[in-house]
């Protein structure tokens, strides 16, 4: 069992550290029980999400390498890098205006690319922005990666941080329990 620097990567985002059996490459794994998916979501929506995730290849988006399933669960295997969430380090780190602007640019670039392949992030929060763990030791953030595109409304029905939902999600699920 491997430890993560930021416990919220597991507890809030649901990413578990996994080791590929054949290659021994570390990956983040998000397990989604089929019984917990949003009401009215069928296999065609999940397959569409998987196709879009595979097309989403951008330095500022956490890459989904493979997806597989068993009888009860769908497993999404994402790239791994030692990281922490922006929420975890935001208040303890001294951020210059230049660092904040660069971080915003990287997030906007990732969002723009994901949008271009049909992925939206409808449950956005600072917990979804992953930074290299080295920022905890005072290093400059070299890259920001966004996690969670396409999940809200298909794989999850509730915002992780219980923040406001995007209008697109509210329109889609208006009146559903």
Image (cartoon, rainbow, N blue to C red):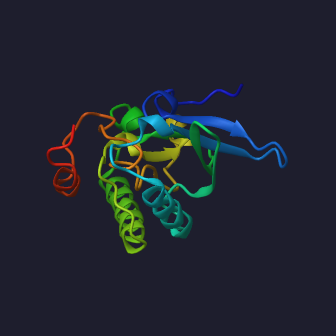
Give me the residue at 67% from left, 45% from top: 27
Identify which residue, 96 or 176, lies in the foreground: 176
Residue 69 position within the rendered picture, expressed as x and y whole percent measured from the top left: 63, 46
Give me the residue at 42% from left, 59% from top: 45
Locate the C terminus by quadrant.
top left
Identify which residue, 61 or 16, lies in the foreground: 16
Give me the residue at 38% from left, 39% from top: 127
Q: Is residue 156 visible?
A: yes
Residue 7 position within the rendered picture, expressed as x and y whole percent measured from the top left: 51, 26
Identify which residue, 163 or 141, lies in the foreground: 163
Q: Is residue 93 visible?
A: no
Residue 9 position within the rendered picture, expressed as x and y whole percent measured from the top left: 49, 34
Identify which residue, 150 or 112, lies in the foreground: 150
90 on left or right of 81: left
22 on left or right of 103: right
- Quadrant position of residue 112: bottom left
Residue 168 position within the rendered picture, expressed as x and y whole percent measured from the top left: 21, 58
Work out which residue is located at the far bottom of the displayed protein and give it. Answer: 116
Give me the residue at 18% from left, 42% from top: 164
Locate the N terminus by quadrant.
top right
């Amino acid at each position: 069992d491997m430890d993560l620097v930021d416990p919220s990567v597991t507890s809030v985002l649901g990413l578990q550290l996994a080791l590929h059996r054949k290659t021994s490459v570390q990956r983040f794994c998000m397990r989604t029980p089929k019984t917990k998916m949003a009401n009215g979501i069928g296999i065609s929506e999940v397959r569409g999400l998987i196709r879009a995730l595979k097309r989403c290849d951008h330095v500022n988006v956490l890459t989904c390498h493979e997806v597989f399933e068993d009888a009860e669960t769908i497993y999404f295997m994402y790239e791994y890098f030692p990281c922490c969430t922006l929420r975890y380090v935001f208040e303890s780190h001294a951020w210059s205006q230049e660092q904040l602007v660069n971080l915003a640019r990287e997030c906007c670039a990732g969002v723009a690319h994901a949008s271009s392949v049909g992925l939206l992030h409808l449950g956005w929060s600072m917990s979804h922005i992953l930074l290299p763990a080295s920022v905890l030791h005072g290093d400059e953030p070299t890259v920001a990666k966004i996690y969670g595109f396409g999940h809200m409304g298909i794989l999850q029905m509730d915002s992780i941080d219980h923040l406001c939902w995007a209008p697109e999600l509210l329109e889609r699920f208006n009146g559903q329990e």
